[in-house]
Image (tube, helix red, strand yellow):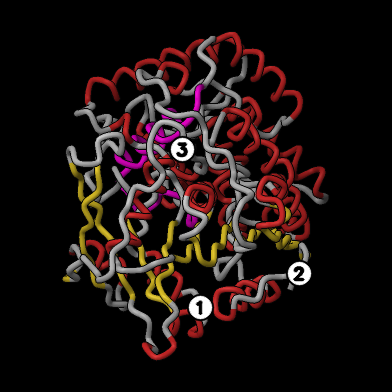
Amino acid sequence: MNRRSSAAQSLALLAVLGLGASLTTVPAAAAEEAKTPQVKWGQCPDDVVAEAAPTVLRCATVPVPLDYAEPEGEQIDLTVSRLAATDPDRRRGVLLLNPGGPGGSGLTLSALLVAQGLPSSVTDRYDLIGMDTRGIGHSTPVSCGFTTGGPYYANIPPYAVDDAAVTAQAKIAQRAAEQCADNDDGTLRHLTTANTARDLDRIRAALGEEKTSYLGYSYGTALGAAYASMFPERADRIVLDSNIGDTHLDRDGMRRYALGMEQTLPDFAKWAAVRHDSYGLGRTPRQVRASYLTLAGRLDRAPVAGIDGNLFRLLTFGHLFKQTQYPKLAQTWQTLLEGDEAAARDPQVLQQEGTDGALSPADNALTVFLAVTCNDVEWPEDVDTYRRGVAEDRARYPLYGAATANITPCAFWPYAPAEPPLEVGTEGPRDVLLLQNRRDASTPHLGGKSLREKFGDRARLVSVDDSGHGVYVLGGNSCALNTTTRYLVDGVMPSKDTSCRAD
């Protein structure tokens, strides 16, 4: 593994989403009601203070059972942060936040949202509660021992150019699963979406709240869907932004990343075609797409400064998360098309913003992603199943299908799911607002439609004619911003599904 592939670890964290949960074998009512707050707020860890600045947060720990089947057994500590409501007389309650992942730290998410323009009407009424969920960052972190430069460095498997590449990846995936088992202290098997949802309810109770509102992005939509399904009587106003479509990520969900890239790359291609004289990627969107396929194939055969076809595809996928990254992506394509080794070695080539898990150390984030996705649902164990899937998706989704259909360590995971996947709950008030861009590489619009159908009349879907990952505040669409703020502040849910035009 060359030095450039190790830098892709942060890119790997963008592969996110997904959880799985169930009520079958563990009692759902995991937390008793708390009439008074049980947490003691103090100074946050130094890295959180620095990341949140200039916003000042307060932090605390909340103990939860490692294993909810033994609620009086071993306890682990979760670290939570608070940005207190600025108008106590108008305070409604708490708004729990999750940035995605699994593997993303959320302790500073409140500060990020405020910095990007979260309306003061929201910060007036809610204590914004961020957290590192179990296993992440400051909340009893876990590690498989993945190292910089090691063979396992991405949540999305590498692009498989042929059957032999699937076989080669199977060996890497198996070793990664074995490495997790070798480094496990007994914690990994308890990292599930169901347990994380139970943790949310423990946090709610510890804060002395009868109900909680929730705002989750990407994988956080699956966690929010799980919480609203497991604890409908305690869910207040739920906003799920950029939905994966269920309460867990399974193989079909990961393969949908390829659909998202097919639907989102045309926006970049249109942008780049207009700027042909500057970047030379093609005079039409079709020519820009052809440049991508040509360049990916060329890099498969002859990498430039350690950037091979797989890393190039992963870079492109990650840069489609935000339209503000298009100039940087175009510059990178131009550099690689020209074979400019010196420019391609610039460390900034491998950096992008807005990917899930970016606030967590690479090993920790990769470990949590694996533990949750592999523990939540059964994954196929037969390598031939993945070979067939790669062949199918290479033809169906030429841009990225042979990566997202490739084999993952979940095929060799040492632990079977403790519970069946949680079904989305239709019982409860109409309290779930779903936000979805129509073009999103990581969470295609299909995810929002799917979760809307599963929630039934409990939910309303806001579809935005825009491209990128993240709608509320992060996206900036005025229609979606106003609709969501009205719901959080005044409880006004759209009477029907809504379509928002691009600003």
Residue 486 falls left or right of residue 83: right
Q: Position of residue 58 (x, y in %)?
A: 24, 72
Which residue does the image show at 57% across and 41% down from the upper left? 336
Amino acid bearing label 3: Leu
Cα separation between marks 3 and 1:
38 Å
Secondary element type, mark 3 = loop
Residue 204's image quarter?
bottom left
Which residue does the image show at 34% across and 35% down from the upper left? 367
Secondary element type, mark 1 = loop
Which region shows up in magenta? 352-378
Q: Position of residue 313 (x, y in %)?
A: 58, 36
Cα separation between marks 2 and 1:
26 Å
**In magenta stretch: residue 375:** yes
Q: Position of residue 331 (x, y in %)?
A: 58, 53
Which residue does the image show at 74% across and 50% down from the upper left? 269
- What residue sits right under mark 2 in the picture? 495
> Foreground mark, 2 or 3?
3
Disc number for residue 117: 1
Q: Residues within 10 Å of mark 3 (few under 14, many from 20)?
A: some
Q: Earlier in the sequence, mark 3 or mark 1?
A: 3
- What residue sits right under mark 3 in the picture? 23
